[in-house]
Image (cartoon, rainbow, N blue to C red):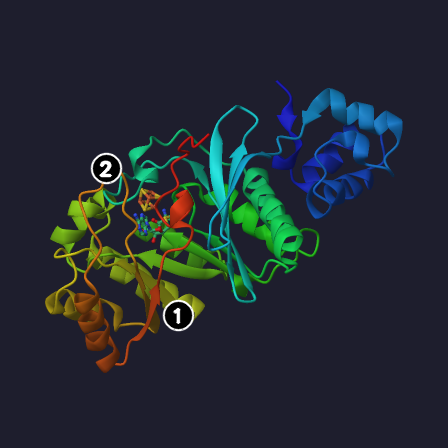
Amino acid sequence: MKKDIRNLSTKELEEFFIKNKQKSFVAKQIMEWLWKKSKSSFSEMKNISKLNRELLDSNFIINSINSDEIQVSSDKTIKTKFKLFDGYTVEGVLIPQNKRMTACISSQVGCSLSCKFCATGTMDRKRNLSAGEIYDQVVHISRQAKENYNFSLSNIVYMGMGEPLLNYSNVIQSIDRLTSSKGLHISKRRITLSTSGISKMIKRLADDNIGVNLALSLHAANDEKRNKIMPIGESNSLKSLKEAIKYYYSKMKKQLTYEYILFDEFNDSIEDAEALYAFTKHTPSKVNIIEYNPIESGIFSKAKEKSLSLFISYLENKGVVVKVRRSRGKDIDAACGQLANKNKS
Ligand code: SAH
Ligand code: SF4
């Protein structure tokens, strides 16, 4: 089977050309066509000799993604179903907000973590996405932002399908390409990685000095409650998460964002707010309260406005920076947690 050329480093590609008695500098040119110019066939690589293009063709493939189905919400959110080379699909979303254009991208086909409130969690995890497949989603969504709204993409969030920290090396490689001047040259400050909380991988992010923004899906600051809705909590207790976050902060000096979906009569009381405050106060952070987007198999409903405002007032009185994130693209199942490759056609 031919290898996906985008899984190679520049050095590996240079070695390939040397082995085939060709000039090694061609590798850098190819890399530019593959990443910066996002070409999906060797024949488009104009400054590469025919001989070298044939050499590439007989040894490699480019597993790029194709948009398969596009839905536009009444609030202008655009959801795209992308078809992968092996027939699997993942979803990516463009979220326009005033002048901000955010791409929400997937990192895995499905997810293995089965959070009780998430549609992706009802699917199995089929496989990890390659760095190229993650990168391609940004390229497509960035084009949509320009073509539909005449704005450049401003932010990228790893909040689509999958748990990015369980596909660590490909996710990190995609960040590398997205931020590199040899790729899309997007600032790390505009990229947010959201995790359900895998303590040892949070520490790894700090050790590897990955300077993107980090968001932790907390949703309950009490182990018993959290484990009920997020089975990953069984092996990653709040104590271990707190320790990982302190470690992360000590190395990165970056404020963390906590994501907290407010469920009616589950995690929306003042005691829950107290627990949340106690958990978050150890390092600089902010809290995003997320409106729950009901899913088919869901056992929850969203919190009432009254509990929402009491919850927020409690936190704000404690000096916590709180933002409420209302859902977007709900009518096309494009909102947080609703991505499940549902076939709408
Ligand atoms: N696996 C990662 C990133 C993808 S999920 C994580 O869990 O963080 C992205 C965000 O959507 C998470 O904060 C997740 O908790 C949230 N989410 C999942 N299901 C949701 C739902 N039904 N309503 C609102 N937010 C949801
Ligand atoms: Fe996976 Fe995140 Fe959904 Fe949980 S919330 S099932 S970790 S995608």
Q: Is residue 38 above or below residue 321?
A: above
The residue carrying mark 2 has its beta carbon less than 8 Å from ligand 1: no
The residue that disc 2 covers is 297
Dot 2: element: loop
| Looking at the image, residue 213 lies above or below residue 310 | above
Q: Residues within 10 Å of mark 1 (few under 14, many from 20)?
A: some
Task: Answer with the quarter of the image where residue 63 lies.
Answer: top right
Asked if the residue at label 1 sits under 8 Å from ligand 1, the reply is: no
Who comes first in sequence, dot 1 or dot 2?
Answer: 1
Residue 195 at what x, y percent from top left?
36, 52
In which quadrant will I find the N terminus?
A: top right
Compared with 253, 12 (above or below) is above
Question: What residue appears at the point 37 percent right and 50 percent down from the top-left corner?
Answer: 336
- Identify residue for label 1: 255
Of marks 1 and 2, the one in the foreground = 2
Residue closest to the eye, 195 or 120 = 120
Say if residue 18 shows up in the picture: no
| Kind of residue indicated by mark 2 | Ser
* Residue 40: x %, y % from top left: 70, 34
Q: Position of residue 275 (x, y in %)?
A: 16, 66
Inter-mark Cα distance, 1 to 2: 34 Å
Asked which quadrant contains residue 127, the reply is top left
Give the amino acid type for the residue marked by disc 1 in the picture.
Gln
